[in-house]
Image (spheres, rainbow, N blue to C red):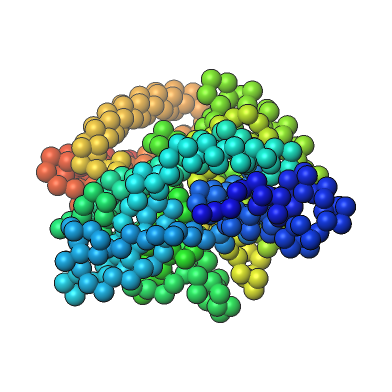
Amino acid sequence: MPAPVQSIWTKHGLTPAASAALRKSAASQVRAPSLPRPNRFRLALEESGGLFTLFGQFLSGRADLLPGPYLTLLRTVRIQREELVSPSSLPEIRDRIVQAEWVRSAPCSEVYAATFQDRPIMVEIFLPEAGGYTNSDFHGLEWQLSHLKNSPEASVATPAVLEQFREWLAFQADADRKRTMLRHLEEIPFPCLSRFPRLLSELQSVRCLIYERMEGAPLADALADPEGAGRALDRWAESLLEQSLLLSLLDADAQPSNYLLLPDGGVGFRTLPALVPVPVEWHNELLQYLTAAIAGNSHRAMQMLARICAGANPYAVEQMLLEKLSALQPELRIQSMAPDSVVALENYWRALGRTSLKPPLFLHLFQRNLSVLGQSLPPETPPTDVISESLWPVLGRLLQFRLGDALSAEKGQEWLASLGLLFLTGVRQAGIVLEQVRDNDLALEIESEPEDGRSAKRNRRVAAVIHSGIGLVLFLFSLRMALQSSGSLQLAATAAAGVCAVAIFILVARIE
């Protein structure tokens, strides 16, 4: 049975009364009084257990609520449960899997490594909704946190933060959502650095999510190795950006211990975290927000934040965010090893935290992922901006995907029809221009000297060369479409290429 939380706050010197006692040399009543306050806050949450431990994990990426030293320490909070749900206690799987071994306690599930028909698998057993915690437990958490209202940690005890915590837990506890996402990720139609495990459909149940175990080198071990840390960090950063910007998914945990570096160069999962989708309507804004932060364009970054968070009046919110950011300038400084882009993102997030806005959960998780990435930099890592460098290959894949989608068979037919109309309009306009040039040349031949005739001939030659170049570009594009498509689209592209070839022949013939 956990000790009363109020006594733990007092025990660690976190409440105003305990701080006063500490100043009056009552150090014997406060545990480890010489420890910095962030360390004592972390110890208090972990010793409280239950929801407080999960709340500490949730806060580990919240740069808008707590300074950097708190975030680094909260990432080490570990879940401690008195009872584990063993696979042998579930009738639907206990006679079908063997060699089950506990791996980790997730916020709302227990994860085991096991074997099924000589195949290594991972078994996630989900606890009741929200980890089995009741409304009474959440009310108790809220009441106990209210004792911090006059402390430096007061920002974590607001109703808005507790509501976001409950939403985060709901995603962690939703086995069906996670199963559906994983099923959709089995066949990604374009090359990705991120790899996702395959579901074992014959073993699924209401409480169990079972997928193939992935084999690779633990990311956490690679980050601890001075020789391979830089390369491992680049691959992880690229994978996180790829998930959010290309696959529109966010890791709700963002822990290096969940990731594997695969032999084929990809990035996989030791245990699959909860995945939260990025709403379709905010894809472009999220991309622009990140690129603006990397470029140091605070004005554009605040515009994107305002669009996502503001609702009816983004302009007023943008001005307010810029004012809050300016007010932060004297105190801006987090870990010296953090990349410049992480510094900028955390500063923007702190400015947003000083307003009354309620950003959506996906934006919190996006910030959390990049903050954890910045905090995971090994001391020996060269001072490079890993997020900026990893963004370029992800943007290349994103452009390739969007162009491929735009040039799909159905959309390609519409696009080619529009291009045909544009081409015919261009040809007609070019004909009108050539007729005007011819009329002017005839007038010049009557009224001008011989040298003026040579000048007009040179102008016609230049115009014919330019038009031939345009025709060549259209011909090559139509030819490429004809080679890469099939059916009616291929016939249309072939016809367009033929028209372009004839036009080029006529224009080239007129060059002389």
Q: Tell whether 182 sits left or right of 296.
A: left
Q: Nearer the viewer, residue 105 or 478?
A: 105
Q: Nearer the viewer, residue 466 or 220?
A: 220
Toward which corner of the image does residue 490 lie, by quadrant? top left
Q: Quadrant of the C terminus?
A: top left
Vertical comparison of 328 with 483: above or below: above
Q: Residue at x 52, y 76 (%)?
A: 228
Query: Residue 246, how many percent across, how many down?
Result: 40, 49
Vertical comparison of 115 with 10: above or below: below
Residue furthest right as drawn: 24
Query: Residue 456, how many percent across, how many down?
Result: 46, 34
Q: Tell whether 242 sits left or right of 366.
A: left
Q: Residue at x 26, y 67 (%)?
A: 121
Toward which corner of the image does residue 315 lie, by quadrant? top right
Query: Residue 59, how many percent across, how many down?
Result: 57, 49
Q: Residue at x 44, y 60 (%)?
A: 82
Q: Residue at x 41, y 75 (%)?
A: 217
